[in-house]
Image: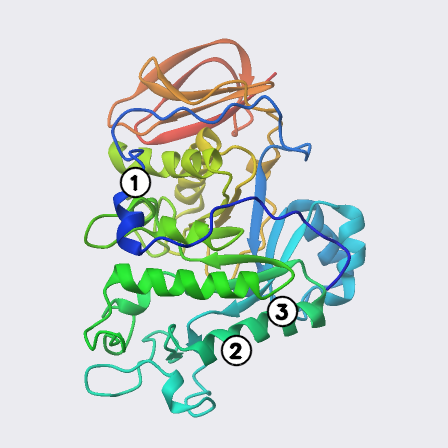
Amino acid sequence: MNDHAHARPSRRRFAASATTTLLALATLTALAVVPAPAMAAPPAADRFLKVYAPENESFAGARTLTQALADAETYDLITAKANTYKANLDAMRVVNPDLVVLVYMNGTFAQRTEGTRYPESWYARDAYGRKVTSKGYGNYLMNPLSPEWIQDRVNQCNTQLQATRYDGCMVDMLGTAPTMVSYVSSPPVNPQTGELWTAIDWQAATTYLALQIDTGTGGLVWGNGYGSATRYFGSRVGGTSKVLSDAVDGALSEIWIRSARQSILTYPNEVTWRKNVNQLVDLGVNGERTAAMVKMWVTATTAQKDAFHRFALSTFLLGSDGTSSFHASYAEGQVLLDHPYWKADIGQPTSSYALIDGVYQRSFSRGRVLVNPTEASRTVDLGGTYVGLDGVSRTTITLAPQTGDVMQLA
């Protein structure tokens, strides 16, 4: 391991059963606005907005020194392939001492070329005894209960960390997608019960796997498994992805506020929208963090994608405590952006988010964030001159339905 260490957040350990965890769900999904944590001590970094880059999803290839340094200036958290930044890591840390770089690895799937690489007992099986593969990639699903597979994942993380000197591992595929017929060739069977995996039991198993990787390595461990805010808060049938926070240092919300292929004109209703804000609040209150990902991988105009981007970024800033990260991408493979929306200098929060004059708002030391997730237009007197993300100065703002803005003091 390298000597560039990041303190691990203090957190609970995965000890309760999935059922017990489910019964202990927070009540943040209620309709009331949830107050954000107190901001007496602002985050150490100068900028409140943290930005995430999933470089492992990029089609751009290896990064040059110039590109790597630009990435270090733009992003605070990066997931990357092993060789992407290894040669330039020290220089990147000079540019951004708080930068965290995670090496990508898959937690529950072997690659499509590895159908015979591992012992047969390590592979997941369906009700007919067949190996299970992902529909999109042809990768082979593994048995998350297998002690040998778990140890293999621990070894993989350690090997990658030693080779790259990155800060930790990003463990992909810890959510419940492998239990869904839309994702895999056929549903896998839980070898402990002989029945199809339930979402609750699968989430418990992958959380345990993540915990073993975390305790068996010297670096940070993040996971991809929160999914959406709806999954995070959960249900009695589907369980909750929130349990993953008991095992990792952070986790991706890969379909936060929207799914990648969803129509750009589809916005969440107000109740669902509040869950997205309240997920961030809940994470902050409990000392946890996420990278909220907004993928707009659909055919649409740039103006339409910009509008959703403004809505999503404003929503994120209402709930974040400054430790979680934001990501937006406009097309598959084009994930390394440096967007002007992320440059707004609004300072640190001076309040929790609240519903004021029919608009959800939050005050910052050098600005305000406003979101209107309703079906009606709202006009707000700003009480001063502010510059929005469109660069226009205003003393009042009219927010059309399902819009948001980040306003910087003029």
Q: Residue drawn at (34%, 44%), measured in percent from left and top?
A: 229
Observer-nearest of 128 and 67: 128
User: Which part of the image, by quadrant, shows the N terminus?
Assistant: bottom right
Return the x and y of residue 311 as percentages of the image width and height: 41, 35
Q: Is residue 227 above or below residue 270?
A: below
Task: Name the residue tied to disc 2.
Answer: 152
In the rendered view, does 379 fall on the left or right side of 167? left
Q: Residue drawn at (51%, 50%), measured in percent from left and top?
A: 250
Tag 3: amino acid:
Gly
- Please report contact status of discs 1 and 2: CB closer than 8 Å, yes or no: no
Tag 1: amino acid:
Tyr
Task: Name the residue tied to disc 1.
Answer: 267
Q: Nearer the viewer, mark 2 or mark 3?
A: 2
Return the x and y of residue 33 as percentages of the image width and height: 33, 24
Observer-nearest of 86 and 308: 86
- Please report contact status of discs 1 and 3: CB closer than 8 Å, yes or no: no
- First reached walking from the N terminus: tag 1 or tag 2: 2
Q: Residue 248 got which mark?
A: none
- First reached walking from the N terminus: tag 1 or tag 3: 3
How far is mark 1 from mark 3, CA to CA?
A: 33 Å
How far is mark 2 from mark 3, CA to CA?
A: 27 Å
Q: Nearer the viewer, mark 1 or mark 2?
A: 2
The answer to whether residue 221 is seen in the rendering is yes
Task: Name the residue tied to disc 3.
Answer: 61
Tag 2: amino acid:
Asp
- First reached walking from the N terminus: tag 2 or tag 3: 3
Observer-nearest of 284 and 361: 284
